[in-house]
Amino acid sequence: MPPSAHESPNPIDSPGRRRLPPLLRRAWYGLNQAFRRRIVHTGVTPDQFTVMRTLLEGDPKGISQRELTQSMSSDPNTVASLLERMETAGWVERHAHETDKRAYRIRLLSSGKRKYLEVRDIAVALQTEVLSVLPDAGREKFLEQLTAVADACRVTAESSPKRAKP
């Protein structure tokens, strides 16, 4: 019986078939490197830009470090280190959370907003350039599908044991 339109004639692990992990890694690595090179003159890293964007788009009172970590799909130590450097640069501030005494709210300061705006146009231009390889009509569908894949990866990670069973 021939494969349907949604099936590949090759098994998912066959050598000639495209594989999701290396494709995602190549895409992320290439995009990250291009962005890093285009913004190096600003003193901002791609991760710092992501922090700025996430804070700017979040609650105006600020968001917790845990919320920031989840939004960025990062780990707590990386985010803590990023925030320390950004606080030292005067781009963000941390203040005590009003209901959780163990947490802080993180807010983007006006100097951080200015820095974000300096880098934003570069980010938009890069995304436009990269997505231009797709037909105009297919770009939004691609991003919807990539969101579904990213969400599935997160759910799979959250439901997987932290340690492999012996």
Image (tube, rainbow, N blue to C red):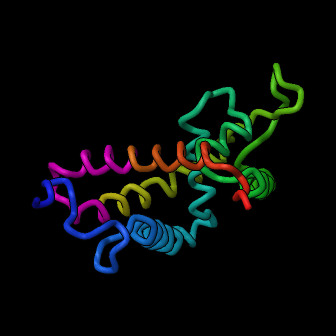
Name which quarter of the figure residue 62 lies in.
top right
Specify whether 149 is left or right of 156: left
Q: Residue at x 44, y 72 (%)?
A: 22
Residue 23 falls within the magenta-colored stretch? no
Residue 131 falls within the magenta-colored stretch? yes
> As drawn, which residue projects farthest toward the left?
2
Picture layout, residue 68 above or below residue 115: above
> As drawn, which residue projects farthest toward the bottom?
15
In x, y percent, where is residue 134? 20, 60
Q: Quadrant of the N terminus?
A: bottom left
Specify whether 32 is left or right of 71: left
> As drawn, which residue projects farthest toward the front?
1
Q: Residue at x 85, y 30 (%)?
A: 96
In terms of secondary structure, what is the magenta stretch mainly?
helix
Q: Which residue occupies the foreground of this view, 36 or 26? A: 26
Q: Which residue occupies the foreground of this view, 112 or 75? A: 75
In x, y percent, where is residue 149? 40, 49
Q: Quadrant of the C terminus?
A: bottom right
Name which quarter of the figure residue 148 lies in.
top left
Specify whether 21 is left or right of 98: left
Q: Is residue 26 visible?
A: yes
Name which quarter of the figure residue 85 lies in.
bottom right
Picture layout, residue 71 above or below residue 126: above
Q: Which residue occupies the foreground of this view, 161 or 74? A: 161
> Which span is picked out in magenta?
129-147
Q: Residue at x 32, y 47 (%)?
A: 145
Q: Which residue occupies the foreground of this view, 15 or 92? A: 15
In x, y percent, where is residue 31? 44, 68
Q: Is residue 38 visible?
A: no
> As drawn, which residue projects farthest toward the top?
99
In x, y percent, where is residue 97? 81, 27
